[in-house]
Amino acid sequence: YYPKVMDFQENNLDHFQTHWSKGHPVVVRSVLKGGSSLNWDPVAMFCCYLMTLNSKTGNTTDCMDWCKVDIDVKHFFLGSLSGKAETNTCQERLKLEGWLSSSLFKEHFPNHYAEILNILPISHYMDPKRGLLNIAANLPDTVETPDFGPCLNISYRSGEEYTLPDSVTKLGFETCDM
């Protein structure tokens, strides 16, 4: 099920709930179109990152053969400017991924964090703090709530590879989604 964010603004929850109740993945499209006042470009996000923390080495995945490589976060983001990572490897499609705790994402990307919470469709399902139908948001105070935060997937391709039909991000799920 691949609804656009506008589908939720039109109160079309029946279709969503049908898929949700069957455990189907729901991929919401066009979330940032027309509603975001922030720049979500990898370079802009990198500048935001630099304002709060020095570069560290992160785990990236070469999407050509899905092997993991180590690359400095700075070089990963700078590679998106030239369309190629500035490393001694030949990877032209890279993806940086990882779980950020909500507090860490909020600390390093405060404006982006607030924007995500503001544009979440069907907030009663998705709001991590006040969602009435979000089980994790409504656990008793005596239960330690899991803090998976947002799953960060930033990827890019070089030059003509944008026309290739394969994707740089695989559809997947986490155990917390079950």
Image: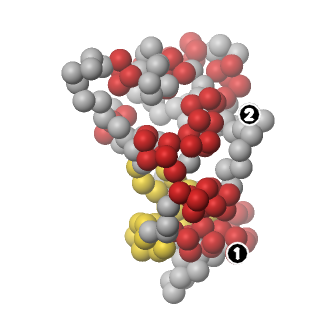
Q: Is residue 72 left or right of residue 6?
A: left
- Residue 99 position within the rendered picture, expressed as x and y whole percent measured from the top left: 40, 49
Q: Quadrant of residue 136?
A: top left
Q: How is the image coloured?
A: secondary structure
- Residue 58 position within the rendered picture, expressed as x and y whole percent measured from the top left: 43, 66
Residue 109 visible: yes
Q: Is residue 1 above or below residue 137?
A: below
Query: Which residue is denoted by mark 1 in the rendering?
Result: 82
Q: Are marks 2 and 1 in contact (CB under 8 Å)?
A: no
Residue lying furthest right? 34
Element carrying mark 2: loop
Rendered residue at 49%/68% (across/down)? 55
- Residue 9 position within the rendered picture, expressed as x and y whole percent measured from the top left: 68, 19
Q: Quadrant of residue 22?
A: top left
Q: Residues within 10 Å of mark 1 (few under 14, many from 20)?
A: few
Element carrying mark 1: helix
Q: Which mark is residue 30?
A: none
In primary-sequence order, the first of circles 2 and 1 is 2
Task: Report the Cα–Cα distance between label 2 and label 1.
Answer: 28 Å
Residue 166 visible: no
- Residue 178 position within the rendered picture, expressed as x and y whole percent measured from the top left: 33, 32
Q: Nearer the viewer, residue 112 or 4?
A: 112
Q: Is residue 131 left or right of residue 139?
A: right
Q: Residues within 10 Å of mark 2 (few under 14, many from 20)?
A: few
Q: Amino acid at mark 2?
A: Gly
Q: Amino acid at mark 1?
A: Ser
Q: Nearer the viewer, residue 32 or 116?
A: 116
Query: Which residue is denoted by mark 2 in the rendering?
Result: 35
Quadrant containing the N terminus is: top right
Rendered residue at 57%/21% (across/down)? 122
